[in-house]
């Protein structure tokens, strides 16, 4: 058996296409995507993954129709809190990544409550990337450092000023639904990450997909600029 990636990032894409194939509104795809997310987290737990980052809403997703944005914000406020027993039963510690201060008040508040209510869970850390953008993350970190009077910006300084600096860099980034791009996800920490792109739409993902991306990860040789 190969090594388990310590930290996996998921670009959960294809909810809209999943719904369209079924002649359903895009929002139905987002609801189905939330169900898939729970299966994927359970799959990660079974495989021994310690950290996951889930790309839920990008800094660019505000460009979508208001109805869709409102629906997603509703999901973050109602469903996240509604799923608290699931998180607590499975030892899932929730964190947010990104600027949640500009989310609608009820969404921001329930996320904050969920983070607090799960802070003692220790099986897996699950970062919800919400209003997250990799470029924004780097700028925010640099601005924090400047405000502290740091005189020289280095990669280590930037990383130390991230939202959750103690979370290790991502080892593997998996993207569903066929697109082969980062879409502003984890730009800094992806420096030496492995990438797996899958055609399967996000709402169709389950525990087995975690097993197969980890098996693909295990076929790679990571060198970090050195020699194998
Ligand atoms: C990903 O699915 C979910 C979010 C970006 C919130 P999409 O909504 O992007 O689905 P497609 O890419 O349109 O199929
Ligand atoms: C990336 O998906 C964002 C999330 C999964 C939250 P998008 O669907 O927004 O990305 P693009 O527009 O295809 O690059
Ligand atoms: Mg998409």
Image (tube, grey):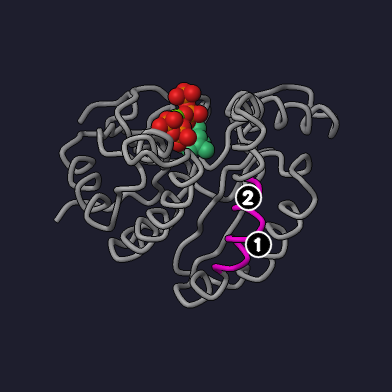
Camera-side residue of 94 and 82: 82
Residue at 64% x, 60% y is: 78
Do tag 2 and tag 1 residues touch (Cβ < 8 Å)? yes
Asked if residue 74 lies left or right of residue 147, the reply is left
Crowdedness of circle 1 by 10 Å Cα count: few (<14), some, many (20+)? many
Q: Residue 198 in the image: x percent, y percent?
A: 26, 35
Q: Is residue 80 visible?
A: yes
Residue at 77% x, 39% y is: 102
Quarter of the picture containing the N terminus is bottom left
Q: Residue 11 in the image: x percent, y percent?
A: 42, 37
Q: Quadrant of ligand 3?
A: top left
Camera-side residue of 114 and 30: 30
Is residue 79 on the magenta stretch?
yes
Quarter of the picture containing the C terminus is top left
Find disc 1 in the rendering and name its residue. 115
Tag 1, which secondary structure? helix
- The magenta-colored residue range is 73-83
Residue at 63% x, 68% y is: 119
Tag 2, which secondary structure? strand
Give residue 96's mark: 2
Please identify the quarter of the rendering in which residue 94 is found: bottom right
């Amino acid at each position: 058996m190969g090594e388990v990636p310590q930290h996996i990032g998921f670009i959960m894409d294809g909810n809209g296409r999943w719904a369209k194939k079924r002649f359903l509104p895009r929002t139905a795809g987002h609801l189905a995507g939330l169900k898939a997310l729970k299966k994927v987290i359970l799959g990660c737990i079974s495989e021994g993954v310690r950290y996951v980052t889930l790309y839920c809403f990008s800094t660019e997703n505000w460009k979508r129709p208001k109805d869709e944005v409102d629906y997603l914000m509703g999901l973050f406020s109602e469903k996240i809190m509604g799923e608290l027993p699931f998180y607590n039963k499975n030892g899932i510690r929730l964190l947010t990544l990104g600027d949640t201060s500009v989310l609608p008040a009820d969404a921001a508040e329930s996320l904050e409550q969920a983070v607090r209510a799960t802070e003692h869970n220790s099986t897996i850390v699950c970062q919800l990337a919400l209003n997250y953008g990799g470029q924004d993350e780097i700028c925010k970190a640099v601005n924090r450092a400047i405000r502290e009077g740091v005189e020289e910006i280095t990669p280590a300084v930037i990383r130390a000023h991230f939202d959750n600096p103690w979370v290790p860099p991502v080892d593997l980034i998996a993207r569903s639904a066929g697109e082969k791009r980062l879409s502003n996800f984890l730009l800094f920490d992806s420096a030496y990450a492995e990438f797996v792109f899958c055609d399967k739409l996000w709402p169709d993902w389950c525990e087995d997909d975690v097993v197969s991306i980890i098996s693909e990860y295990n076929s790679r040789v990571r060198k970090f600029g050195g020699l194998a």
